[in-house]
Image (tube, rainbow, N blue to C red):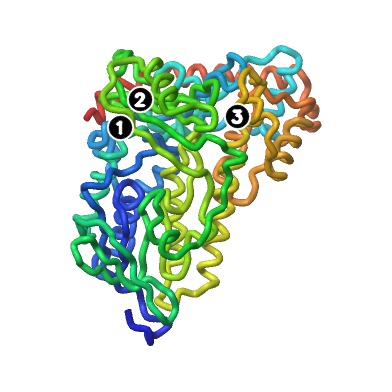
Amino acid sequence: MNEEANPQSKINKIVILGGGTAGWMTAAALSKVLGQNYCEISLIESDHIGTVSVGEATIPQISLFNKLLGIDENDFIKKTQGTFKLGIEFINWTKGGAYIHPFGDYGTTMEAIQFHHYWLKVNQLGKAPDLEEFSLAAVAARQGKFMRPQNMGNSPLSQINYAFHFDATLYANYLRNYAVERGVKRVEGKMLQASLRDSDGHIESLQLESGEQIKGDFFIDCSGFKALLIEETLKTGFIDWSDELPCDSAVAIPCMSKDTDKLYPYTQSKAQQAGWIWRIPLQHRVGNGYVYPSKFVSDEEAVQILTDQLEGESLGQPNFLRWTTGMRKQSWHKNCLAIGLSAGFVEPLESTGLHLIQSAIARFMSLFPHQSFNQTDIDAFNSQSKSEFEYIKDFIVLHYKVTDRDDSEFWRYCQNMKISPRLQQKIELYQTNGRIYRQDTELFNETSWLAVMNGQGLTPSGYHPLVDVLSQSEVERRLEHIHSVIQKSADTMPQQLDFIKKYCQA
Protein backbone atom coordinates (compact mmCIF):
# COMPACT_ATOMS: atom_id res chain seq x y z
CA MET A 1 0.00 0.00 0.00
CA ASN A 2 1.31 3.45 -0.91
CA GLU A 3 1.59 5.56 2.24
CA GLU A 4 1.64 8.75 0.17
CA ALA A 5 -1.43 7.78 -1.84
CA ASN A 6 -3.75 10.47 -3.17
CA PRO A 7 -6.61 10.82 -0.66
CA GLN A 8 -9.01 10.27 -3.56
CA SER A 9 -7.16 7.22 -4.91
CA LYS A 10 -9.39 4.19 -5.18
CA ILE A 11 -9.26 0.90 -3.36
CA ASN A 12 -7.35 -1.51 -5.60
CA LYS A 13 -7.50 -4.70 -3.58
CA ILE A 14 -10.01 -6.02 -1.03
CA VAL A 15 -9.09 -9.05 1.08
CA ILE A 16 -11.84 -11.03 2.83
CA LEU A 17 -10.67 -13.28 5.68
CA GLY A 18 -13.00 -16.23 6.15
CA GLY A 19 -15.52 -18.04 3.99
CA GLY A 20 -18.78 -19.46 5.25
CA THR A 21 -22.00 -17.55 4.75
CA ALA A 22 -20.64 -14.13 5.79
CA GLY A 23 -17.52 -14.32 3.62
CA TRP A 24 -19.23 -15.58 0.49
CA MET A 25 -22.27 -13.29 0.84
CA THR A 26 -19.79 -10.38 1.02
CA ALA A 27 -17.70 -11.65 -1.88
CA ALA A 28 -20.78 -12.29 -4.04
CA ALA A 29 -22.23 -8.83 -3.41
CA LEU A 30 -18.93 -7.01 -3.99
CA SER A 31 -18.23 -8.95 -7.19
CA LYS A 32 -21.69 -8.05 -8.49
CA VAL A 33 -21.59 -4.35 -7.57
CA LEU A 34 -17.91 -3.61 -8.31
CA GLY A 35 -17.58 -5.83 -11.37
CA GLN A 36 -14.27 -7.37 -12.40
CA ASN A 37 -12.48 -4.19 -13.43
CA TYR A 38 -12.83 -1.87 -10.44
CA CYS A 39 -10.62 -3.75 -7.98
CA GLU A 40 -9.24 -7.16 -7.11
CA ILE A 41 -11.14 -9.23 -4.53
CA SER A 42 -9.51 -12.16 -2.72
CA LEU A 43 -11.08 -14.43 -0.12
CA ILE A 44 -8.94 -16.53 2.23
CA GLU A 45 -10.46 -19.67 3.71
CA SER A 46 -9.32 -23.10 4.81
CA ASP A 47 -11.03 -26.37 4.04
CA HIS A 48 -9.76 -27.54 7.43
CA ILE A 49 -11.70 -24.91 9.41
CA GLY A 50 -15.37 -25.71 9.88
CA THR A 51 -17.78 -22.83 9.38
CA VAL A 52 -20.22 -21.78 12.09
CA SER A 53 -23.86 -22.10 11.10
CA VAL A 54 -26.18 -20.35 13.57
CA GLY A 55 -29.29 -21.44 11.75
CA GLU A 56 -30.67 -21.84 8.29
CA ALA A 57 -33.67 -19.54 8.50
CA THR A 58 -34.06 -16.02 7.10
CA ILE A 59 -36.43 -13.04 7.06
CA PRO A 60 -38.03 -11.45 3.95
CA GLN A 61 -35.25 -8.90 3.41
CA ILE A 62 -33.09 -11.70 1.96
CA SER A 63 -35.13 -11.35 -1.25
CA LEU A 64 -33.55 -7.92 -1.76
CA PHE A 65 -30.10 -9.51 -1.55
CA ASN A 66 -31.05 -12.21 -4.06
CA LYS A 67 -32.46 -9.53 -6.35
CA LEU A 68 -29.22 -7.55 -6.15
CA LEU A 69 -27.29 -10.62 -7.25
CA GLY A 70 -29.80 -11.41 -10.00
CA ILE A 71 -30.31 -14.91 -8.59
CA ASP A 72 -32.97 -17.15 -10.13
CA GLU A 73 -35.05 -18.04 -7.07
CA ASN A 74 -36.13 -21.49 -8.21
CA ASP A 75 -32.53 -22.43 -9.01
CA PHE A 76 -31.40 -21.09 -5.63
CA ILE A 77 -34.06 -23.12 -3.78
CA LYS A 78 -33.16 -26.32 -5.68
CA LYS A 79 -29.44 -26.04 -5.04
CA THR A 80 -29.76 -25.27 -1.30
CA GLN A 81 -32.50 -27.86 -0.53
CA GLY A 82 -34.58 -24.82 0.41
CA THR A 83 -38.16 -24.30 1.52
CA PHE A 84 -40.28 -21.19 2.00
CA LYS A 85 -41.07 -19.41 5.25
CA LEU A 86 -44.12 -17.30 6.16
CA GLY A 87 -43.24 -16.70 9.81
CA ILE A 88 -42.07 -18.21 13.09
CA GLU A 89 -44.18 -20.22 15.54
CA PHE A 90 -43.40 -19.71 19.23
CA ILE A 91 -44.44 -22.60 21.47
CA ASN A 92 -44.53 -22.53 25.29
CA TRP A 93 -43.09 -19.02 25.56
CA THR A 94 -46.08 -18.48 27.84
CA LYS A 95 -47.76 -21.12 30.00
CA GLY A 96 -48.95 -23.58 27.39
CA GLY A 97 -49.47 -21.01 24.66
CA ALA A 98 -48.43 -20.90 21.00
CA TYR A 99 -48.53 -18.13 18.42
CA ILE A 100 -47.11 -17.24 15.02
CA HIS A 101 -45.07 -14.13 14.27
CA PRO A 102 -46.13 -13.77 10.62
CA PHE A 103 -44.49 -12.00 7.70
CA GLY A 104 -47.20 -9.62 6.53
CA ASP A 105 -49.85 -7.36 8.00
CA TYR A 106 -52.87 -8.12 10.12
CA GLY A 107 -56.05 -6.93 8.40
CA THR A 108 -55.77 -3.48 6.86
CA THR A 109 -55.47 0.08 8.12
CA MET A 110 -58.88 1.76 8.41
CA GLU A 111 -59.56 5.49 8.64
CA ALA A 112 -55.79 6.01 9.05
CA ILE A 113 -55.84 3.93 12.27
CA GLN A 114 -53.89 0.66 12.55
CA PHE A 115 -56.09 -2.42 12.21
CA HIS A 116 -55.21 -3.92 15.58
CA HIS A 117 -56.92 -1.06 17.45
CA TYR A 118 -60.28 -2.06 15.94
CA TRP A 119 -59.53 -5.68 16.78
CA LEU A 120 -58.66 -4.71 20.36
CA LYS A 121 -62.04 -3.02 20.80
CA VAL A 122 -64.02 -6.01 19.53
CA ASN A 123 -61.77 -8.48 21.35
CA GLN A 124 -62.35 -6.71 24.67
CA LEU A 125 -66.05 -7.41 24.14
CA GLY A 126 -65.26 -11.09 23.52
CA LYS A 127 -66.51 -10.92 19.92
CA ALA A 128 -63.30 -11.15 17.85
CA PRO A 129 -61.60 -14.24 16.39
CA ASP A 130 -57.95 -14.73 17.35
CA LEU A 131 -55.67 -12.02 15.95
CA GLU A 132 -53.79 -14.69 13.97
CA GLU A 133 -56.88 -15.30 11.82
CA PHE A 134 -56.52 -11.82 10.34
CA SER A 135 -53.07 -12.60 8.92
CA LEU A 136 -52.91 -14.47 5.60
CA ALA A 137 -49.33 -15.49 6.35
CA ALA A 138 -50.30 -17.07 9.69
CA VAL A 139 -53.43 -18.78 8.34
CA ALA A 140 -51.58 -20.20 5.31
CA ALA A 141 -48.64 -21.28 7.47
CA ARG A 142 -50.91 -23.27 9.80
CA GLN A 143 -52.37 -25.04 6.77
CA GLY A 144 -48.97 -25.82 5.20
CA LYS A 145 -49.71 -23.60 2.20
CA PHE A 146 -47.50 -21.33 0.11
CA MET A 147 -47.48 -19.34 -3.09
CA ARG A 148 -45.65 -16.28 -4.35
CA PRO A 149 -47.57 -12.98 -4.46
CA GLN A 150 -50.10 -12.65 -7.28
CA ASN A 151 -50.89 -9.52 -9.29
CA MET A 152 -54.42 -9.12 -7.91
CA GLY A 153 -54.86 -5.50 -6.87
CA ASN A 154 -55.97 -5.12 -3.25
CA SER A 155 -56.19 -8.87 -2.58
CA PRO A 156 -54.08 -10.20 0.33
CA LEU A 157 -52.65 -12.61 -2.26
CA SER A 158 -50.81 -9.69 -3.87
CA GLN A 159 -48.94 -8.89 -0.65
CA ILE A 160 -47.42 -12.21 0.43
CA ASN A 161 -44.10 -11.62 2.20
CA TYR A 162 -41.86 -14.64 2.54
CA ALA A 163 -38.35 -15.78 3.36
CA PHE A 164 -36.46 -19.07 3.13
CA HIS A 165 -35.08 -22.02 5.01
CA PHE A 166 -31.97 -23.54 3.44
CA ASP A 167 -28.86 -25.59 4.09
CA ALA A 168 -26.28 -22.99 5.16
CA THR A 169 -23.33 -24.99 3.80
CA LEU A 170 -25.01 -25.41 0.42
CA TYR A 171 -25.85 -21.69 0.42
CA ALA A 172 -22.20 -20.74 1.05
CA ASN A 173 -21.14 -23.07 -1.79
CA TYR A 174 -23.79 -21.56 -4.07
CA LEU A 175 -22.48 -18.05 -3.38
CA ARG A 176 -18.86 -19.20 -3.70
CA ASN A 177 -19.52 -20.45 -7.22
CA TYR A 178 -21.32 -17.20 -8.00
CA ALA A 179 -18.45 -15.05 -6.71
CA VAL A 180 -15.62 -17.08 -8.29
CA GLU A 181 -17.40 -16.94 -11.66
CA ARG A 182 -17.31 -13.13 -11.31
CA GLY A 183 -13.61 -12.91 -10.63
CA VAL A 184 -13.21 -13.37 -6.86
CA LYS A 185 -9.95 -15.18 -6.15
CA ARG A 186 -10.22 -17.90 -3.52
CA VAL A 187 -7.02 -18.47 -1.53
CA GLU A 188 -6.72 -21.72 0.44
CA GLY A 189 -4.98 -21.25 3.76
CA LYS A 190 -5.02 -20.23 7.44
CA MET A 191 -3.90 -16.82 8.67
CA LEU A 192 -0.88 -16.88 10.94
CA GLN A 193 -0.72 -13.17 11.73
CA ALA A 194 -1.52 -9.70 10.39
CA SER A 195 1.13 -7.05 9.75
CA LEU A 196 0.33 -3.44 10.64
CA ARG A 197 1.72 -0.36 8.94
CA ASP A 198 3.97 1.66 11.27
CA SER A 199 2.71 5.06 10.09
CA ASP A 200 -0.98 4.68 10.99
CA GLY A 201 -1.64 1.18 12.34
CA HIS A 202 -3.62 0.10 9.28
CA ILE A 203 -3.44 -3.55 8.25
CA GLU A 204 -0.85 -3.97 5.51
CA SER A 205 -0.85 -7.71 4.86
CA LEU A 206 -1.85 -11.13 6.18
CA GLN A 207 0.71 -13.89 6.54
CA LEU A 208 -0.59 -17.41 5.95
CA GLU A 209 0.73 -20.59 7.53
CA SER A 210 2.11 -21.50 4.12
CA GLY A 211 4.37 -18.44 4.27
CA GLU A 212 2.40 -16.56 1.60
CA GLN A 213 1.84 -12.84 2.21
CA ILE A 214 -1.52 -11.40 1.10
CA LYS A 215 -1.43 -7.63 0.76
CA GLY A 216 -4.49 -5.40 0.42
CA ASP A 217 -5.90 -1.90 0.68
CA PHE A 218 -8.99 -2.95 2.62
CA PHE A 219 -9.63 -6.02 4.79
CA ILE A 220 -12.99 -7.55 5.67
CA ASP A 221 -13.06 -9.77 8.75
CA CYS A 222 -15.42 -12.71 8.29
CA SER A 223 -13.47 -14.98 10.64
CA GLY A 224 -16.48 -15.66 12.88
CA PHE A 225 -16.44 -15.50 16.66
CA LYS A 226 -12.62 -15.43 16.65
CA ALA A 227 -12.66 -11.94 15.08
CA LEU A 228 -9.02 -12.38 14.06
CA LEU A 229 -8.63 -8.91 12.53
CA ILE A 230 -11.11 -6.55 14.17
CA GLU A 231 -10.43 -7.80 17.72
CA GLU A 232 -7.31 -9.96 17.93
CA THR A 233 -5.31 -7.58 15.71
CA LEU A 234 -6.95 -4.16 16.10
CA LYS A 235 -8.45 -4.64 19.59
CA THR A 236 -11.61 -2.57 19.07
CA GLY A 237 -13.40 -3.80 22.21
CA PHE A 238 -16.76 -5.47 22.81
CA ILE A 239 -20.14 -4.50 24.28
CA ASP A 240 -21.48 -7.41 26.34
CA TRP A 241 -25.28 -7.98 26.53
CA SER A 242 -25.21 -11.25 28.47
CA ASP A 243 -27.24 -9.74 31.33
CA GLU A 244 -30.23 -9.24 29.03
CA LEU A 245 -29.72 -12.33 26.86
CA PRO A 246 -28.19 -15.03 29.07
CA CYS A 247 -28.25 -17.86 26.50
CA ASP A 248 -24.61 -18.36 25.47
CA SER A 249 -24.53 -21.83 23.91
CA ALA A 250 -26.21 -23.99 21.30
CA VAL A 251 -26.06 -27.57 20.12
CA ALA A 252 -27.35 -28.53 16.66
CA ILE A 253 -28.35 -31.97 15.36
CA PRO A 254 -30.12 -32.51 11.99
CA CYS A 255 -32.62 -35.34 11.60
CA MET A 256 -34.99 -37.02 9.18
CA SER A 257 -38.46 -35.51 8.81
CA LYS A 258 -41.34 -37.35 10.42
CA ASP A 259 -44.14 -35.82 8.36
CA THR A 260 -43.36 -36.29 4.66
CA ASP A 261 -46.91 -35.47 3.56
CA LYS A 262 -46.82 -31.92 4.90
CA LEU A 263 -44.12 -29.28 4.66
CA TYR A 264 -45.00 -26.40 6.95
CA PRO A 265 -43.69 -22.99 5.80
CA TYR A 266 -42.51 -21.66 9.14
CA THR A 267 -39.68 -21.97 11.64
CA GLN A 268 -40.54 -23.25 15.10
CA SER A 269 -39.12 -22.05 18.41
CA LYS A 270 -40.13 -24.17 21.39
CA ALA A 271 -39.27 -22.76 24.82
CA GLN A 272 -37.71 -25.11 27.39
CA GLN A 273 -37.13 -24.88 31.15
CA ALA A 274 -34.14 -22.79 30.10
CA GLY A 275 -33.66 -21.55 26.53
CA TRP A 276 -35.43 -22.87 23.43
CA ILE A 277 -35.28 -25.43 20.60
CA TRP A 278 -35.49 -24.53 16.93
CA ARG A 279 -36.97 -26.61 14.10
CA ILE A 280 -36.18 -25.67 10.51
CA PRO A 281 -37.80 -27.81 7.77
CA LEU A 282 -35.72 -28.33 4.59
CA GLN A 283 -36.47 -30.49 1.55
CA HIS A 284 -34.05 -33.26 2.58
CA ARG A 285 -34.00 -33.03 6.39
CA VAL A 286 -34.98 -31.03 9.47
CA GLY A 287 -32.54 -28.68 11.18
CA ASN A 288 -32.76 -28.80 14.98
CA GLY A 289 -30.89 -26.90 17.64
CA TYR A 290 -31.10 -26.06 21.32
CA VAL A 291 -30.10 -22.56 22.44
CA TYR A 292 -29.37 -22.61 26.15
CA PRO A 293 -27.65 -20.77 29.02
CA SER A 294 -24.60 -22.72 30.25
CA LYS A 295 -25.28 -21.30 33.72
CA PHE A 296 -28.47 -23.36 33.94
CA VAL A 297 -27.89 -26.29 31.52
CA SER A 298 -24.79 -28.47 31.02
CA ASP A 299 -23.68 -29.60 27.55
CA GLU A 300 -24.62 -33.20 28.39
CA GLU A 301 -28.09 -32.14 29.52
CA ALA A 302 -28.50 -30.01 26.37
CA VAL A 303 -27.72 -32.96 24.07
CA GLN A 304 -30.17 -35.16 25.98
CA ILE A 305 -32.95 -32.56 25.90
CA LEU A 306 -32.52 -32.01 22.15
CA THR A 307 -32.13 -35.71 21.30
CA ASP A 308 -35.30 -36.57 23.23
CA GLN A 309 -37.27 -34.16 21.03
CA LEU A 310 -35.91 -35.16 17.60
CA GLU A 311 -38.79 -36.29 15.41
CA GLY A 312 -36.74 -38.69 13.28
CA GLU A 313 -33.41 -40.48 12.92
CA SER A 314 -30.40 -38.31 13.77
CA LEU A 315 -28.26 -37.40 10.75
CA GLY A 316 -25.12 -36.17 12.48
CA GLN A 317 -23.13 -35.71 15.65
CA PRO A 318 -23.91 -32.84 18.03
CA ASN A 319 -22.34 -29.58 16.84
CA PHE A 320 -21.69 -27.11 19.68
CA LEU A 321 -21.52 -23.32 19.45
CA ARG A 322 -20.35 -20.86 22.11
CA TRP A 323 -20.72 -17.11 22.12
CA THR A 324 -20.90 -13.95 24.14
CA THR A 325 -23.99 -11.95 23.16
CA GLY A 326 -23.10 -8.42 22.11
CA MET A 327 -21.30 -6.41 19.46
CA ARG A 328 -17.97 -4.78 18.66
CA LYS A 329 -17.57 -1.21 19.84
CA GLN A 330 -16.43 -0.48 16.28
CA SER A 331 -17.33 -2.80 13.41
CA TRP A 332 -15.25 -0.62 11.06
CA HIS A 333 -11.85 0.53 12.31
CA LYS A 334 -9.07 1.95 10.13
CA ASN A 335 -8.98 -0.18 6.94
CA CYS A 336 -10.80 -3.17 8.45
CA LEU A 337 -14.51 -3.99 8.52
CA ALA A 338 -16.08 -6.86 10.49
CA ILE A 339 -19.09 -8.59 8.93
CA GLY A 340 -21.06 -11.46 10.42
CA LEU A 341 -20.17 -13.10 13.72
CA SER A 342 -16.92 -11.12 13.98
CA ALA A 343 -19.03 -7.95 14.26
CA GLY A 344 -21.35 -9.27 16.95
CA PHE A 345 -24.00 -11.82 17.75
CA VAL A 346 -27.59 -11.80 18.93
CA GLU A 347 -29.08 -15.29 19.29
CA PRO A 348 -31.01 -16.60 16.24
CA LEU A 349 -34.47 -16.42 17.83
CA GLU A 350 -35.86 -14.19 15.05
CA SER A 351 -33.50 -15.38 12.27
CA THR A 352 -31.61 -12.09 12.04
CA GLY A 353 -28.08 -13.44 11.49
CA LEU A 354 -28.04 -13.34 7.70
CA HIS A 355 -29.88 -10.02 7.69
CA LEU A 356 -27.13 -8.41 9.77
CA ILE A 357 -24.59 -9.62 7.20
CA GLN A 358 -26.73 -8.30 4.36
CA SER A 359 -27.34 -4.89 5.94
CA ALA A 360 -23.64 -4.47 6.81
CA ILE A 361 -22.76 -5.13 3.15
CA ALA A 362 -25.38 -2.61 1.99
CA ARG A 363 -24.15 0.00 4.48
CA PHE A 364 -20.56 -0.56 3.38
CA MET A 365 -21.50 -0.11 -0.27
CA SER A 366 -23.25 3.18 0.50
CA LEU A 367 -20.15 4.41 2.38
CA PHE A 368 -17.57 2.73 0.13
CA PRO A 369 -14.21 4.40 0.81
CA HIS A 370 -11.27 5.91 -1.00
CA GLN A 371 -7.87 5.04 0.41
CA SER A 372 -8.16 8.12 2.63
CA PHE A 373 -10.72 6.27 4.81
CA ASN A 374 -12.68 9.34 5.92
CA GLN A 375 -13.38 9.05 9.65
CA THR A 376 -16.82 10.67 9.25
CA ASP A 377 -17.87 7.80 6.97
CA ILE A 378 -16.49 5.24 9.41
CA ASP A 379 -18.27 6.89 12.36
CA ALA A 380 -21.55 6.91 10.42
CA PHE A 381 -21.20 3.20 9.65
CA ASN A 382 -20.49 2.34 13.28
CA SER A 383 -23.31 4.50 14.60
CA GLN A 384 -25.84 2.90 12.25
CA SER A 385 -24.55 -0.59 13.08
CA LYS A 386 -24.88 0.08 16.80
CA SER A 387 -28.48 1.27 16.42
CA GLU A 388 -29.40 -1.73 14.30
CA PHE A 389 -27.91 -4.21 16.77
CA GLU A 390 -29.58 -2.45 19.72
CA TYR A 391 -33.03 -2.43 18.09
CA ILE A 392 -32.76 -6.14 17.28
CA LYS A 393 -31.48 -6.91 20.77
CA ASP A 394 -34.48 -5.15 22.34
CA PHE A 395 -36.90 -7.12 20.17
CA ILE A 396 -35.30 -10.43 21.14
CA VAL A 397 -35.29 -9.47 24.84
CA LEU A 398 -39.05 -8.77 24.58
CA HIS A 399 -39.70 -12.51 24.10
CA TYR A 400 -37.95 -13.37 27.37
CA LYS A 401 -39.14 -10.44 29.47
CA VAL A 402 -42.86 -10.46 28.69
CA THR A 403 -43.99 -13.90 29.83
CA ASP A 404 -46.06 -15.45 32.60
CA ARG A 405 -43.60 -18.37 32.86
CA ASP A 406 -42.12 -18.57 36.36
CA ASP A 407 -41.61 -22.33 36.51
CA SER A 408 -37.79 -22.29 36.58
CA GLU A 409 -34.90 -20.21 37.83
CA PHE A 410 -34.19 -19.17 34.23
CA TRP A 411 -37.65 -17.76 33.54
CA ARG A 412 -37.79 -16.02 36.91
CA TYR A 413 -34.47 -14.37 36.06
CA CYS A 414 -35.87 -13.21 32.71
CA GLN A 415 -39.01 -11.78 34.31
CA ASN A 416 -36.96 -9.73 36.76
CA MET A 417 -34.00 -8.67 34.61
CA LYS A 418 -33.32 -5.04 33.82
CA ILE A 419 -34.13 -3.97 30.25
CA SER A 420 -33.33 -0.88 28.19
CA PRO A 421 -35.42 2.29 28.76
CA ARG A 422 -36.43 2.18 25.07
CA LEU A 423 -37.88 -1.33 25.38
CA GLN A 424 -39.58 -0.42 28.65
CA GLN A 425 -41.27 2.53 26.93
CA LYS A 426 -42.46 0.34 24.04
CA ILE A 427 -44.04 -2.11 26.47
CA GLU A 428 -45.75 0.65 28.46
CA LEU A 429 -47.08 2.38 25.31
CA TYR A 430 -48.70 -0.87 24.23
CA GLN A 431 -50.05 -1.68 27.70
CA THR A 432 -51.99 1.58 27.93
CA ASN A 433 -53.77 2.02 24.59
CA GLY A 434 -52.17 -0.52 22.27
CA ARG A 435 -49.83 2.01 20.66
CA ILE A 436 -46.88 0.71 18.65
CA TYR A 437 -44.32 2.89 16.91
CA ARG A 438 -41.49 1.91 14.60
CA GLN A 439 -38.44 3.92 15.62
CA ASP A 440 -36.09 5.34 12.99
CA THR A 441 -34.87 2.51 10.75
CA GLU A 442 -35.40 -0.36 13.20
CA LEU A 443 -35.69 -3.73 11.47
CA PHE A 444 -38.90 -5.01 13.04
CA ASN A 445 -42.07 -3.13 12.14
CA GLU A 446 -45.35 -2.59 13.99
CA THR A 447 -46.72 -5.97 12.85
CA SER A 448 -43.77 -7.81 14.39
CA TRP A 449 -44.02 -5.99 17.72
CA LEU A 450 -47.78 -6.62 17.80
CA ALA A 451 -47.35 -10.32 17.03
CA VAL A 452 -44.94 -10.88 19.89
CA MET A 453 -46.54 -8.59 22.49
CA ASN A 454 -50.00 -10.03 21.86
CA GLY A 455 -48.65 -13.56 21.53
CA GLN A 456 -46.74 -13.30 24.80
CA GLY A 457 -49.94 -12.32 26.59
CA LEU A 458 -49.53 -8.55 26.91
CA THR A 459 -53.05 -7.07 27.01
CA PRO A 460 -53.61 -3.32 26.58
CA SER A 461 -56.10 -1.66 28.91
CA GLY A 462 -57.50 0.37 26.02
CA TYR A 463 -57.31 1.13 22.30
CA HIS A 464 -56.93 4.19 20.07
CA PRO A 465 -59.83 6.53 20.96
CA LEU A 466 -60.50 7.38 17.28
CA VAL A 467 -61.69 3.81 16.73
CA ASP A 468 -64.96 5.03 18.27
CA VAL A 469 -65.55 7.30 15.25
CA LEU A 470 -67.05 4.18 13.66
CA SER A 471 -70.09 2.54 15.24
CA GLN A 472 -69.69 -0.79 17.00
CA SER A 473 -71.75 -2.55 14.35
CA GLU A 474 -69.68 -1.03 11.54
CA VAL A 475 -66.40 -2.13 13.16
CA GLU A 476 -67.77 -5.65 13.60
CA ARG A 477 -69.01 -5.72 9.98
CA ARG A 478 -65.60 -4.66 8.63
CA LEU A 479 -63.73 -7.19 10.76
CA GLU A 480 -66.07 -9.94 9.62
CA HIS A 481 -65.44 -9.00 5.97
CA ILE A 482 -61.64 -8.90 6.41
CA HIS A 483 -61.72 -12.24 8.21
CA SER A 484 -63.72 -13.79 5.37
CA VAL A 485 -61.35 -12.43 2.70
CA ILE A 486 -58.31 -13.81 4.54
CA GLN A 487 -59.86 -17.28 4.90
CA LYS A 488 -60.95 -17.40 1.23
CA SER A 489 -57.52 -16.25 0.08
CA ALA A 490 -55.83 -19.02 2.04
CA ASP A 491 -58.26 -21.56 0.54
CA THR A 492 -56.97 -20.76 -2.97
CA MET A 493 -53.29 -21.35 -2.07
CA PRO A 494 -51.55 -24.66 -2.86
CA GLN A 495 -49.74 -26.81 -0.34
CA GLN A 496 -46.07 -25.81 -0.06
CA LEU A 497 -45.07 -29.41 -0.89
CA ASP A 498 -46.99 -29.23 -4.19
CA PHE A 499 -45.60 -25.75 -4.96
CA ILE A 500 -42.02 -26.94 -4.49
CA LYS A 501 -42.58 -30.11 -6.54
CA LYS A 502 -43.88 -27.97 -9.39
CA TYR A 503 -41.24 -25.21 -9.39
CA CYS A 504 -38.11 -25.88 -7.36
CA GLN A 505 -37.63 -29.42 -6.09
CA ALA A 506 -34.01 -30.26 -5.34
Quarter of the N terminus within the rendering: bottom left
Residue 503, position as x, y percentages in the image: 26, 29
Horizontal and vertical percent position of residue 266: 43, 26
Pointer 3 or 2: first along the chain: 2
Identify the image quadrant of residue 421: top right
Q: Secondary structure at mark 3?
A: helix
Horizontal side, residue 174 vs residue 474: left or right = left
Q: Which residue is mark 2?
A: 281
Residue at the location (40% across, 76% down)?
371
The relative height of residue 361 versus residue 139 in the rendered view (above or below) is below
**Residue 121 image-quadrant placement:** top right
Q: Earlier in the sequence, mark 2 or mark 1?
A: 1
Q: Residue at x 18, y 62 (%)?
A: 210
Q: Amino acid at mark 1?
A: Gly
Disc 2 element: strand
333 sits to left or right of 21: right
Per the image, the residue denoted by label 1 is: 82
Distance between mark 3 and mark 2 Cα atoms: 22 Å
Q: What distance separates the C-alpha of mark 3 from that of mark 1?
A: 26 Å
Residue 212: x and y, percent?
Answer: 20, 67
- Residue 420, x across and y down, in percent: 68, 44
Q: Which residue is mark 3?
A: 452
Amino acid carrying mark 3 in the image: Val
Q: How many marks?
A: 3
**What crowding class fits label 3: few (fewer than 14 Cα within 10 Å), some (14-19), or many (20 or more)?**
many
At a point 41% along the width and 55% down the height, the residue shown is 227
Judge by depth and name the residue closer to the eye, 135 or 39.
39
